[in-house]
């Protein structure tokens, strides 16, 4: 098995990952049923003493969440993003 980070397989994976979780994020959200909370929904939650942790900013994507805490209420997302970014950097260096 070739573990070379320059391999076409790694590049294909990164391209597919970025297509689904970054460039085509609006379609991915639609297919997963992810919807942005309306102001009324946010207000209703606040009245109940609840709030939703922002895990992806409205202008963010899974790959670029644009929130201060990428791990907030999302288990291993921080680990996945760190590993993705490390592989991406290895490919750039090659």
Image (cartoon, rainbow, N blue to C red):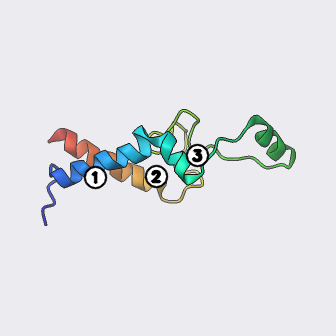
Residue 86 visible in the shown view: no
**Marks 3 and 2, how far apart at CA:** 11 Å
Q: Residue at x 76, y 41 (%)?
A: 42
Residue 74 visible in the shown view: yes
Instruction: Check the image and name the residue furthest to the bottom.
Output: 1
**How crowded is the residue under tag 1: few (<14 C-alpha within 10 Å), some, or many (20+)?**
few
Image quarter in which the C terminus is found:
top left
Closest to the camera, between mark 1 and mark 2, is 1
| 46 to the left or right of 18 | right
Q: Which mark is residue 55?
A: 3
Q: Measured from the top left, where is residue 46 in percent x and y?
A: 82, 43
**How crowded is the residue under tag 2: few (<14 C-alpha within 10 Å), some, or many (20+)?**
some
**Marks 1 and 3, how far apart at CA:** 24 Å
| 90 to the left or right of 81 | left
Closest to the camera, between mark 1 and mark 3, is 1
N-terminal of the pair, mark 1 or mark 2, is: 1
Q: Tell me the SS state at disc 3.
A: loop
Q: Which mark is residue 87?
A: none
Name the residue that disc number 2 marks: 78
Name the residue that disc number 1 marks: 13
Q: Measured from the top left, where is residue 82 in percent x and y?
A: 38, 50
Instruction: Check the image and name the residue furthest to the top.
Output: 59
As rendered, which of 61 and 32 lies closer to the eye? 32
| 72 to the left or right of 87 | right
């Amino acid at each position: 098995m070739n573990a070379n980070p320059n391999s076409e397989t790694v590049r294909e994976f990164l391209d597919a990952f970025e297509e689904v979780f970054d460039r085509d994020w609006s379609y991915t959200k639609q297919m997963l049923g992810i919807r942005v909370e309306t102001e009324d929904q946010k207000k209703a939650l606040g009245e109940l003493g609840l709030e939703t942790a922002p895990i992806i900013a409205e202008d963010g994507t899974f790959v670029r969440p644009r929130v201060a805490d990428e791990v907030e209420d999302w288990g291993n997302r921080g680990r996945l993003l760190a590993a993705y970014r490390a592989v991406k950097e290895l490919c750039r260096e090659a």
